């Protein structure tokens, strides 16, 4: 591996976080590994989560589920986002669970199941007030009726009923109680009509931590599995960030006072100083909006990025400190050595840690560290 910037993913942290979340919820856990496990590497993270007791996996798209199956993972996997035109046959054939929030999609799944000659496992998705995926309360009886017909025909088995919360990171937000109540009503309607779901599920990470009334039969944490606090203004139970992104100083040199640094000369040195070049840019996931704002750790101290983040590199001004070519630079990590966390970067940029970890570039290798075996695999 030659790329100078890498994301080291601590699988022991993933396991610890899953164990912590399972203990808090007291229910089975569906570890959300969509978007390549929030940038952490879907297959190794999925395996670690299952080892730690997660019983289910959740992804967004069919191809993400099939990639887990291709890697030999046989645990239940739920697909949540199924755009029109998606070929769901391979998913039905691979025993992948499908979220269905519209009559059209339910019919497509049932047709695919008939063609494959297998019963499709479906989770009926309720829109309890987020107005994202799912069927609204008004249309719900029609979806339930269609599902019962498909069950009678043997094409579909309703394994789950689920919904998603809009504001679980603000536990006092009035929408939380409204959505929780709507979910209970919609589950109640479906069960009264004869649906017998194995799992009813509503809670994402913040709801696992702060809204026990939303736990039902299964919880779906994502960001907390990766050790990042889903609601940074509220305490977390000791989650450990799994990802550390590092790079290496490629050039360190003295420049005179008054030297303009990087594109646009947004930064000018105010004395003779050492500038160090770090070969990570916005193509690697260092946001250009972090120019002059984000801090990285070099030679034991945090240093602000000097001037613009370029596509492949940025510069730091290290003063008279002994920073040399080849030195390690920590972009973000768990914070143990004084480095920023993904949450710190997100706070500085007005975004969420989810975006910091998922936006890491494709050319940044993910190195999976398994402290049980001291085995590092790319
Ligand atoms: C992404 C997602 C989750 C996980 O959300 P976190 O806030 O990362 O815990 C759970 N459920 C659904 C439907 C999702 O899309």
Image (tube, rainbow, N blue to C red):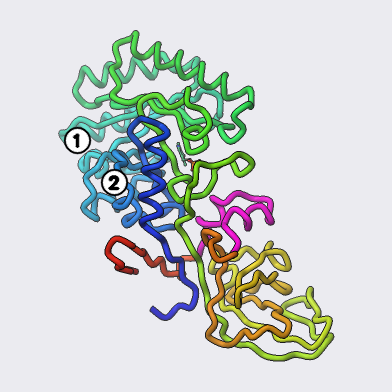
Horizontal side of residue 170 vs 366, given as left or right:
right
In contact (CB < 8 Å): disc 2 and disc 1: no
Q: Position of residue 46 (x, y in %)?
A: 32, 50
Q: Nearer the viewer, mark 2 or mark 1?
A: 2
Residue under numbered circle 1: 115
Q: Position of residue 184 (x, y in %)?
A: 45, 16
Q: Residue at x 19, y 23 (%)?
A: 154
Whether residue 15 is visible: yes
Q: Main secondary structure of the magenta part?
A: helix
Callout 2 secondary element: helix
Q: Position of residue 366 (x, y in %)?
A: 41, 66
Residue 265 falls within the magenta-colored stretch: no
Q: Which image quarter holds the N terminus?
A: bottom left
Whether residue 59 is visible: no
Say which of 120 and 55 sits in front.
55
> How many discs appear?
2
Q: Residue at x 39, y 52 (%)?
A: 14
Q: Residue at x 42, y 34 (%)?
A: 24
Q: Residue at x 50, y 17 (%)?
A: 182
**Are there few (<14), some (14-19), or many (20+) residues within 10 Å of tag 2?**
many
Horizontal side of residue 237 vs 323, given as left or right:
left
Say which of 183 and 303 sits in front.
303
Callout 1 secondary element: helix
The part of the chain drawn in magenta is 339-360
Residue under numbered circle 2: 50
**Are there few (<14), some (14-19), or many (20+) residues within 10 Å of tag 1?**
few
**Hey, which residue is sitting farthest left in the picture?**
117
């Amino acid at each position: 591996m030659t790329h100078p910037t890498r994301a080291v993913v601590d699988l022991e942290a993933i396991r610890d976080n899953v164990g912590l979340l399972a203990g808090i919820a007291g229910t089975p856990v569906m570890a959300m590994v969509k978007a390549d496990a929030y940038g952490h590497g879907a297959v190794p993270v999925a395996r670690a989560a299952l080892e730690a007791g997660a019983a289910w996996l959740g992804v967004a798209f069919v191809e993400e589920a099939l990639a887990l199956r291709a890697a030999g993972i046989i645990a239940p996997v739920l697909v949540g986002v199924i755009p029109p035109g998606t070929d769901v046959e391979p998913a039905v054939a691979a025993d992948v669970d499908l979220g269905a929030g519209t009559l059209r999609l339910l019919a497509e799944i049932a047709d695919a199941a008939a063609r494959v000659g297998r019963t499709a496992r479906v989770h009926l998705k309720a829109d309890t007030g987020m107005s994202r995926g799912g069927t609204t309360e008004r249309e719900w009886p029609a979806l339930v009726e269609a599902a019962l017909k498909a069950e009678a025909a043997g094409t579909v088995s309703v394994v789950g009923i689920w919904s998603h919360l809009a504001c679980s990171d603000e536990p006092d937000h009035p929408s939380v109680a409204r959505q929780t109540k709507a979910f209970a009503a919609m589950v109640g309607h479906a069960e009264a009509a004869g649906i017998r779901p194995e799992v009813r599920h509503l809670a994402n990470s913040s709801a696992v931590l702060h809204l026990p009334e939303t736990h039902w039969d299964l919880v779906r944490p994502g960001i907390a599995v990766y050790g990042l606090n889903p609601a940074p203004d509220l305490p977390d139970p000791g989650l450990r960030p799994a990802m550390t992104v590092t790079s290496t100083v490629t050039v360190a040199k003295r420049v005179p006072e008054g030297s303009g640094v990087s594109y646009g000369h947004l930064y000018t040195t105010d004395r003779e100083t050492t500038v160090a070049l770090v070969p990570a840019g916005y193509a690697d996931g260092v946001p250009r909006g972090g120019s002059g704002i984000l801090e990285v750790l070099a030679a034991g101290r945090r240093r602000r990025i000097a001037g613009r983040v370029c596509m492949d590199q940025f510069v730091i001004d290290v003063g008279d400190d002994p920073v040399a070519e080849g030195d390690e630079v920590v972009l973000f990590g768990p914070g143990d050595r004084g480095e920023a966390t993904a949450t710190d970067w997100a706070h500085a940029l007005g975004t969420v840690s989810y975006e910091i970890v998922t936006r890491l570039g494709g050319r940044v290798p993910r190195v999976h560290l398994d402290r049980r075996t001291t085995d590092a695999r790319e």
